[in-house]
Image: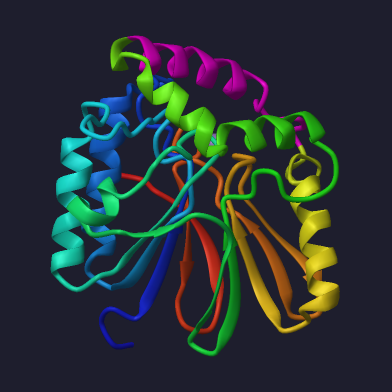
Amino acid sequence: MTPHSKTYFASDFHLGVDADLSSLDREKMIIRWLDRISVDAREIYLVGDIFDYWFEYRHVVPKGYFRLFHKLNELIESGIPIHFFKGNHDLWQYEYLERDIGVTMHHGPYETTIDGSQFFIAHGDGLGPGDIKYKVIKGILTNRMCQRLFSILHPNFGLSMMRRMSHKSRNGHTLISSDPIITNQQCITFCKEHLATHPNTHYYVMGHWHHPLIHPIGPLNYYINLGDWVSYFSYGVWNGSSFDLAYYQE
Ligand SMILES: [Mn+2]
């Protein structure tokens, strides 16, 4: 196998919130993971909710994450492209990460071919039936005028408000079931419907539900949930011919 032949996927770091491990400890762990995979990574996809909350003002960004930003920039400079998806917790990102860190930002689902296989990559929020309340809220949060009004608030006030909102929403997203197929049902339903009209899609790679899973949805088609780096420390690896979930251990 040639070096730099693997594609890595991870999501839902939720940096900015302390869990069993503090945000800083998890950030340092993520950097050690990035160092490890940089040996054979060709591309890295970070599939949303990297930050637990984020708002980018015209001249101000939330402080912290310097270590992560530095590492991402270093990998990009070394020739490993990093794709960055907005999640439902950090959808207010504009050009800072793209311009200053060099990531390729995706504002919605992204379809691409990797080693001849067709991938559909998305954070996963708002996909599938139901969750009407969230879809309405997302409509408001992504509204330009609402964003402009919010940006008038002083960052000390605006960001602590976001932090509280984010905490509430996370509590609403604790695992629905101990069965990952049930937790992921909404996205699985979406993928099956999408597959009916796009039968060439081989892999649907998503985050959001925080419950790692590889689930067949067709003869050669799979739904993958990447889990999270709050409790699972899970990630996806595509080695050119197959997709696996792995769990980071020091
Ligand atoms: Mn999440």
Main SS of residues in magenta: helix
* Residue shown at 49% from the left, 54% from the top: 107
Q: Position of residue 24 (x, y in %)?
A: 26, 27
Q: Position of residue 72 (x, y in %)?
A: 22, 54
Is residue 223 or residue 57 the one in the foreground? 57
Q: Is residue 189 visible?
A: yes
Is residue 83 or residue 245 the one in the foreground? 83
* Residue shown at 23% from the left, 65% from the top: 38
| Image quarter hosting the N terminus | bottom left
* Residue shown at 73% from the left, 44% from the top: 180
User: Hey, which quadrant is residue 148 in on the image?
Assistant: top left
User: In this rendering, is residue 223 above or below 186?
Assistant: below
Where ligand 1 lies, by image quadrant?
top right
Is residue 235 or residue 171 the one in the foreground? 171
Q: Is residue 245 magenta?
A: no
Q: Which stretch appears magenta?
A: 157-178
* Residue shown at 39% from the left, 48% from the top: 248
Is residue 146 or residue 69 the one in the foreground? 146
Q: Is residue 175 magenta?
A: yes
